[in-house]
Amino acid sequence: MSKEQDFPLWEIFIQSKRGLDHKHVGSLHAADAQMAIENARDVYTRRNEGNSIWAVLAENLHASKPEDQGAFFDPADDKVYRHPTFYVMPKEAKYI
Amino acid sequence: MTQQEALFRFAVRMGDNSLVLGHRLSEWCGHGPQLEEDIAQANIALDLIGQARNYLTYAGEVEGKKRSEDDLAYLRTDRDYLNVLLCELPKGDYAQTIARSFLFDAFHLPLQQALTTSTDERLKGIAEKAVKEVTYHLRHSSEWLIRFGDGTEESHSRAQVALNDLWRYTGELFIPDEAEEMLAKAGVVPKLGDIQKEWSATVGRVLKEATLNRPADGWAASGGKKGVHSEHLGPMLAEMQTLQRTYPGVEW
């Protein structure tokens, strides 16, 4: 086995159908973008899951920090007026 | 030889090429140089074994002796296998596996493309499905050969050694046997000379990009197409067939 740290890590996003979002499915190692896409084809689309593949170098993803959770997300909890729940919906509009 | 016998031999050969190479590639399963390649080779092996099923099923029907795909795969000895020698060679190191796959894929793709215009409906149908698979196989083996050739000193030298060792097995791909000559005249299969031109162009293009030398043509090993195989096929078939030989008719 070669050392896997020889190859950088890539995050893989697969679009299952045209028009839908690309969803994160996992990660893999590859030497470059082309190899990442080909590996993703083999690792993540074997059972006909895919229509399009995005590969992003994992080091290019920037994530929010877990310790910021409180400051980032909690203030939204008590602002019910941000949700459009105070309108009376006509009966005919079922799926809003 | 009747045309029916020729068609049987051709379908068996196509099936055997795919089955034997598929088995060789499956030997990497769990032993690949990295997880992603392990999965890629297993996928390619499964594609090839799927093609073998189609061809051997058709061969059994053409023969008309009620032999199934399984009978043909598991109950023939090496003398009845008609695959080219290239497919049966041991997997070797990863450069040898990739170089062998590349030399075969570069032949397999134009052959399958040509078979999509066969006058035989079944061969045509099988080829239409196989073309997409084999397009990917050639892409995969080409990419790796280029990476090895244009990679480190070690990967370059291993790839060149593999090519030099395998080159003598490529001549056999293009020497038609009686069945292939008969079927080519009838428009059922392409002329192997035409396939060779496409193979040669692909090989030239990829080796150039890989900065690898094209070995000189010389003595060509042959015999596989008439059932005279290297010492490597027997042990491979013994392993592949052991279950069916030990428990005849077993199902699971």
Image: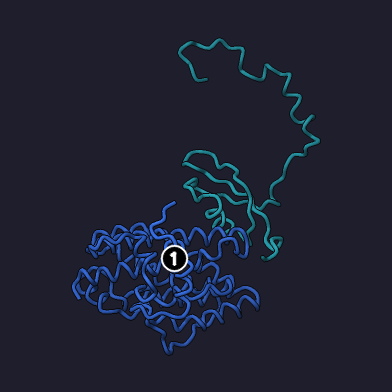
B213 on left or right of B73: right
Q: Is residue B123 visible?
A: no
Residue extending furthest toward the bottom: B218
Residue at 71% x, 52% y is: A59
Residue at 24% x, 73% y is: B184
Image quadrant of residue A33? bottom right
Residue A79's place in the image compared with B239, above or below, is above
Q: Secondary structure at mark 1?
A: helix
Image quadrant of residue B212? bottom right
- Which residue is denoted by mark 1 in the rendering? B241
Chain seen in blue: B
Residue at 72% x, 22% y is: A77
What is the x, y in percent for residue B240?
Answer: 46, 66
Q: Nearer the viewer, residue B235 or A53?
A: B235
Chain seen in cyan: A
| Quadrant, the N terminus of chain A | bottom right
Q: Nearer the viewer, residue B85 or A71?
A: B85
What is the x, y in percent for residue B152?
Answer: 65, 75
Residue A60's place in the image compared with A78, above or below, is below
Q: Is residue B68 visible?
A: yes
A69 on left or right of A82: right
B36 on left or right of B18: right
Classify mark 1: residues with Cα within 10 Å, few (<14), some (14-19) or many (20+).
some
**What chain does mark 1 sit on?**
B
State the scheme by which the image is colored: by chain
Q: For the image shown, how many numbered marks are present on the structure?
A: 1
Residue at 38% x, 78% y is: B224
